[in-house]
Image (tube, grey):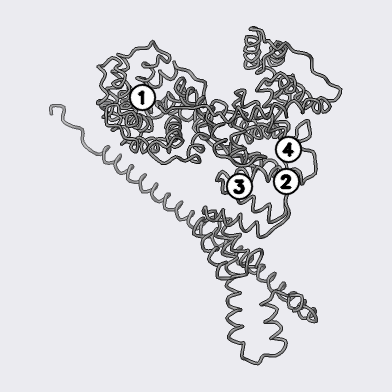
Amino acid sequence: MVRRYAPVWRWSVAVLLVVGLSLLRADEQEEAGAVTAPELDAEATPEHEKRFAQGMALIANEAVREGYRVVQEASDLGSDAARVTLALSYLYGNSTATPRNLTRTFILCKEGADQGLPESEWCLGFLYAMGLGVDASQAKALLYYTFAALGGSINAQMSMGFRYMSGGAVAKDCEASLGYYRPVAEAVEALVHEAGAVVVERQRISITGHKKARTMGSPEVVQYYQYSADRGDAPSQLTLGQLHLQGHGVPQDFQRARHYLELAAGNGDPDAMASLGDMYVNGLGVEQDNATALKYLETAAQRNSAAGRTSLGVMYLNGWSVQRDPEMAYKLFHKAAAAGHPDGQHNLGSLYYSGTGTTKDYRKAMHYFTLAAQQGHVLAMYNLALMHGHGIGTSRSCESARGLLKNVAERGEWGRELMNAHEIYESGDTDEALLRYLVLAEMGYEVAQHNAALLMDAGRSTLFPFDRIDVQQRALLNWQRSADQGATQSRLKVGDYHYYGLGVDASLEAAAQEYRSAADHNNHQAMFYLGSMHHFGLGLDRDLHLAKRFYDLAIETSAEAYVPTILALYHLYGLFALEYAQEYLHNLELPASLAKTMDVMMTGDFDALIEGNEMPILMFLTALLVVVLLTRQLRRHQYQQFVLAQQRLAEAQRQREAAAAAAAAAAAAATTESQVAEAVAAPAPDEGQ
């Protein structure tokens, strides 16, 4: 749609880095110790990819040990993908065939990196970034990430894009970040055109209770839809058919998808008809048939299905089984867009951009791309990013373009690793889950940064057996990364780390700054903390009026803040009363003891109040304790009497109901006997009648 250009700056960086990379070789041979890598043939044979695919198929079919043996063969033949697969398997320790072995991981990654293989270079860069199996070195991590990115490693490109965005071991540079995210976003765009968008669920883990969220693809939800669909519920049949069509939460199965969609269509669901039309257009589980697709889509569109109108518009735009009619396509897309359908909005934007079927209008194109992007439409985000990046229909904005391209890049097939990490965490393997989250955190996934920080914060992992401060610093780094991407709860945690001095020197002023940032995003906890800091003069000027303002905001923002905030407000009201009393009594002559008491209550120096009055205070507290105990005993006795009274009332009521039931039964029996007697006494009817 928009002209693309290669980022020339990257090649100039490569020339400068070649010298640096060569200088590292000798140092890394020392780090590897006595273990030396075998010489590998630089020319990979055609057999290596075939063997790698066979090995991965065996692993997928649970022949794990044999599968990894075949993958090892592929690695020996020169497969970079096989080598990195083995290295990560030894890193994760996710198989009995490949127990966790950081030294083995380092050797495998080093072998490939020495040959300039990009995925191995990325792997080595990750080990240096994390300090896993080697001493941490951000300089070496940056060097290997850069070469891997130049070689086309998507992981490395995303890692470098995020580093230039966040300033991780490099100066922030939007243009450099944009240059790294662009090829990844282009790969995602091509993937979406070919196979459709990948569903990536971004789930935050829960430390307390391991409560698993119920998502659309979770087994419990699928089971519910299966139950309802089998009993003829059309919406459930539609949903289940679409889940099977997309392979979301269930194995992709076009035949089952068609079965449930046909059931829903038979029940009159127009969106099911639209999905069936799409299956015939693309030949998914059926023989490709535009004529049959057209029938389904026309019926769906006539029944006001936005999805049906969108797909029918595509057929008119391309002239499939109908005469090509861009104007009709425009009308159909317009109706679908008005109904809020993201595909319709994107397609309408594309027509405005190219001037097909309507007048070219970049502003309207941007408007509809924006509407679709707000609903997560990947192609709309991509096109919108290119318009911002080239200043088409708007002034050029590197930040806007970079943010959109990053969002697109994170929706590739590799994003499924988020769901994989979450499932591993739910299974109880915290170390492997943390490692996978750390890989994704380096690539810039905010949810992964949050989850990695949470696991380290809770002390749930044994990956980093160093002192607690080292783990806190790692957690703080990821809390900060997550917070800088807009995660308010992470911003709150950054404030906590500064407040308590976890992984950083304690600073109440820095904590207050972080809390203020979180409060600006309507976080009720941050508002409460700011209120308490003003309340007691911790890191902020003591100001009771500002404290009350933040307490009130906390209650207005969330009901969860009600109880602690009300307690704090009671104390605050007490201070207000003391201030008023102090002002009122200021000109009165008070006894020395009373004046001392007032001063102590205002300043909070209770040690001065206790000094010399220990015995009276002890007697008062003892008497108070006796009163409290007697009161509790009296209330317990009153409660027991109340329970007994209720039981007596219930028994009396039961007896009354039983008596009433017996009387009713007796009356019914008497009525029946009377009717029987009357029937017996009645004369027999005349036979002649």
Disc number lying in front (4 or 2): 2
Q: Residue at x 58, y 45 (%)?
A: 484
Task: Compare marks 3 and 1 and give the one earlier in the sequence.
Answer: 1
Upstream in sequence: badge 4 or badge 3 = 4
Q: Identify residue for label 2.
A: 472
Which of the two discs, 4 and 3, sits closer to the camera? 3
- Residue under the point 34% across and 19% down: 277
The residue beneath circle 3 is 490
Is residue 637 visible to us here? yes
At label 3, the amino acid type is Ser
Label 1 sits on what residue type? Ala
Q: Nearer the viewer, mark 2 or mark 1?
A: 2
Which numbered marker is on residue 651? none
The earlier-in-sequence mark between 2 and 1 is 1
Closest to the observer, 327 or 594: 327
Q: Residue at x 65, y 22 (%)?
A: 118
Toward the bottom, the furthest residue is 589
Above-or-below relation of 185 to 623: above
Mark 4 or 2 closer to N-term?
A: 4
Q: Amino acid at mark 4?
A: Ser
Q: Spatial distance from mark 4 to mark 1, Cα to Cα?
A: 46 Å
Question: Closest to the observer: 607 or 179?
Answer: 179
Front-most of 677 and 408?
408
Q: Which residue is mark 4?
A: 461
Instruction: Give me the C-alpha separation between circle 4 and circle 2.
Output: 12 Å
Classify mark 4: helix, strand or loop. Answer: loop
Position in image of residue 388 (x %, y %): 44, 37
First in sequence, mark 2 or 3: give its number.
Answer: 2
Q: Residues within 10 Å of mark 2 (few under 14, many from 20)?
A: many
The residues tagged by marks 4 and 3 sit, at their Cα atoms, a distance apart of 19 Å
